[in-house]
Amino acid sequence: MTGKEAQQPEELPVVFVHRRPSFILPFGDHLRSQFHVLDPYESPEPYDSFLARHAPSIRALMTMGPTLVSAEFLDRLPVLELIVATSAGLDHIDLPACRSRGIVVTNASSAFAEDAADCAVGLLIDVLRRISAADRFVRGRMWPVKETYPLGFKLGGKRVGIVGLGSIGSEVAKRLSAFGCTIAYTARNKKQSVPIPFYANVRDLAANSDVLVLCCALTKETYHLVNKDVMVALGKEGVIINVGRGSLINEKELVQCLVGGEIGGAGLDVYENEPNVPKELFGLDNVVLSPHSAPATPESFEAVLQLTVGNLKAFFSNKPLVSVVSNE
Amino acid sequence: MADKEPQQPKELPIVLVHRLPSYKIPLDPSFRDQLRSQFHMLDPHESPEPYDSFLARHAPFIRVLMTIGYSPISAEFLERLPVLELIVATSAGLNHIDLPACWSRGIVVTNASLAFAEDVADCAVGLLIDVLRRISAADRFVRGRLWPVKENYPLGFKLGDKRVGIVGLGSIGSEVAKRLLAFGCTIAYTSRNKKQSVSFPFYANVRDLAANSDVLVLCCALTKETYHMINKDVMVALGKDGVIINVGRGSLINEKELLQCLVGGEMGGAGLDVYEIEPNVPKELFGLDNVVLSPHCAVMTPESFEALDQLIVVNLKAFFSNKPLVSVVSNE
């Protein structure tokens, strides 16, 4: 290790790695070849002392996983200008505090968007066409016994309401259009350049949709955005797909509606209290459960690495950043 | 039933309903009414008269036949209908019909592909996403309460950039291509003949297609030529990460060799809606997480059945008014 210290001249830009101790850095080597990586958990020095000692030189920080970045933590990094997050969701970062400090935040949406969209579409086809339920039927040796299997429903013609038309929502729209679905959306603001019908709130979107696909960020405003009102507006055959954050939905009310047959089905990749999934869902054939793996492919992890390194390099050469999270 | 007879004047065009006794005409009442109000539907199994006698008596007038489900039509059966000109089939697959015998008699055959194509394509794509992204396997993982225990779930693989080889670029294959393009996949195909109006790369045989693909989607008809077209050679050419999706007919694949390759880890995975001997699914598949099993229901939505009903009525009306037919199955 001491040999490595000599190879890391202080000329290399400093990047602080902010992670939980159990979270191993997957692309450590790639980063170390281009940056002076400061990782408090790889140092024998106590965390607080390490942080205080290096703080004056920390302009850029990379977060691994959902490690909390609070306003108090930000106070300990007085010259911080950039946070490069390696996730799409940023609900673990105090964004208002960053904004008021002028700290730029980038996320990994664009690296994950296609895979998250593929998963959302896969979950929707699965719920409508009962693919996983049919697979259980066959594996349970039921096919020779009960000759027919309940019908699924056609995708084409379904009205899909996308909640949050960012990079992930746009990729979902592109895919579902090819299946003959009609698309509408809600977002914080109408996107002027987009020719898709816009609804100012999620309840109106639900009232005019057969399917809701949740692709938006979890914030104070979007917490429990999808509640019983919205589900009733969506209707008894409505389907909800969630690849955003569990708490976008009032999970208790979702379970009630599903168990009570008040909505048609759900495909969930995220839950309010992962990895705990409400047991009532295990017996339902119109629900497909995914263990928060929508973005998880080797290809997307590679893309996140490229995105992360790319943004760090751009920052230190005063070039434009990508995947910047803004307030609109 | 008796007072219905006067309402079916012999002026209505005659259509023979060809079905195994166990098959029934779809029970949708509006469809039955549509048929009965426009055509004189002859159903030998609804007559007290013995089958052979009923058929022989009506044969001189039977120009059109509607076949229900997979009721077989052999060359011998065709010989009993000397003036037959049209067979309206109610399935997409026609391997139960002696097509060469039809064509040599000049009998036109229409199928249900046009009505079913979108739903079958949706299912094929759903199976592919499921295999690549392990959706059903992950669902079992969660339902088995394993998520809190084993925190990580094996990664799936990205769809975009996958090279998808479509076997049979008919109505179903075209809908599959349209959908997978939106995911960023690249498309190539094989078919009996190259399709001049199509810009996707064409391979003359399935082995070459497999060698240049990551995924094969089987959307073609089962014929003497395509029987067991997917064999061990093709699977080896596809490669260890290769995925096969079959929404055609089970016997397009040599199922025994498929099993060997899947169990032996020589293939990446498979999504199957059809099998060689339905409803028997090889038990070796039940324990595999990279296989998704569907009980021959790719077509099964209320919407596709509705579309099929319409397609049948449209074709019957068109035939009797000398108008063009749709979803005609030809030899090319």
Image: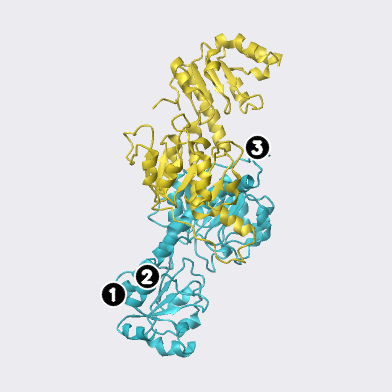
Chain colours: A yellow, B cyan
Left or right? Give the position of A226 relative to A192.
right
The Cα–Cα distance between marks 3 and 1, rounded to whole angstroms, is: 66 Å
Q: Nearer the viewer, mark 3 or mark 2?
A: 2
N-terminal-most mark, 3 or 1: 3
Q: Quadrant of the C terminus of chain B?
A: bottom left
> The numbered mark 1 sits on a residue in which chain?
B
Q: Quadrant of residue B322?
A: bottom left
Disc 1, SS: loop
Q: Amino acid at mark 3?
A: Glu
Q: Is residue A283 above or below residue B148?
A: below
Residue B294 coordinates in the image, percent (x, y): 56, 58
Residue at numbered disc 2: B30
Residue at numbered disc 3: B151
Picture residue at 35% right of the left edge, 83% below the top: B4
N-terminal-most mark, 3 or 2: 2
Residue B321 coordinates in the image, percent (x, y): 28, 74
Residue at numbered disc 1: B321
The Cα–Cα distance between marks 1 and 2, rounded to whole angstroms, is: 22 Å
- Residue A327: which numbered mark, if any? none
Residue B111 coordinates in the image, percent (x, y): 43, 68
